Image: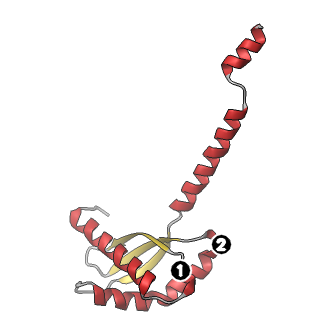
Amino acid sequence: MKQNASSRRVNEQARQTIAEILMFDVSDPRLNDVTVTGCEVSFDRSFCNVFYTTDPANYETTAEALKRAAGKIRSEMARKLSWRVAPELRFVLDASVDEAERIAQALAAESERFEAQPSVNEAYEEENA
């Protein structure tokens, strides 16, 4: 979807509002460690894809808790925002955070492996000594 300043502002407003609702208005303990990473609100504001991340061990329980809390989140969102329509919420797991963590661990392991190898200059000096 093409983004302009207005749609970015609407997406950020939705993200911030949903994050606040999860933090202060929803009392489900399964949602305590959820981070809303982004939102994509449709042009007519009837749908909102909510991207979230959480601990990998809690993926299924968090998805179920978000599904159960979607109605409350939607009604609170309608109350807090002055939009004509309260969008239907679709929660989507954002795997990019997990992918970034996997890449960081791979780079750290490769760095350790590289540091453990003798440098090219040291190997050359040992051969010619």
Residue at the disc numbered 2: 57
Nearest the camera: 57 or 4?
Answer: 57
User: Residue 14: x and y, percent?
Assistant: 33, 76
Vertical comparison of 6 with 64: above or below: above
By what rule are the colours in the image chosen? secondary structure
Vertical comparison of 73 with 54: above or below: below
Gap between marks 2 and 1, in whole Å? 14 Å
User: Residue 72: x and y, percent?
Assistant: 42, 91
Residue at the disc numbered 1: 32
Vertical comparison of 72 with 93: above or below: below
At a point 50% along the width and 83% down the height, the residue shown is 66
Nearest the camera: 7 or 33?
Answer: 33
At a point 63% along the width and 51% down the height, the residue shown is 105
| Label 2 secondary element | helix
Crowdedness of circle 1 by 10 Å Cα count: few (<14), some, many (20+)?
A: few
Q: Which amino acid lies under the numbered mark 2 shown in the image of this protein?
A: Ala
Label located before the other in sequence (2 or 1): 1
Snapshot quadrant of residue 39: bottom left
User: Residue 40: x and y, percent?
Assistant: 35, 70
Snapshot quadrant of residue 127: top right
At a point 57% along the width and 61% down the height, the residue shown is 98
Task: Name the quadrant of the N terminus.
Answer: bottom left
Nearest the camera: 91 or 107?
Answer: 107
Q: Is residue 122 left or right of residue 81?
A: right
Q: Which amino acid lies under the numbered mark 1 shown in the image of this protein?
A: Asn
Snapshot quadrant of residue 9: bottom left
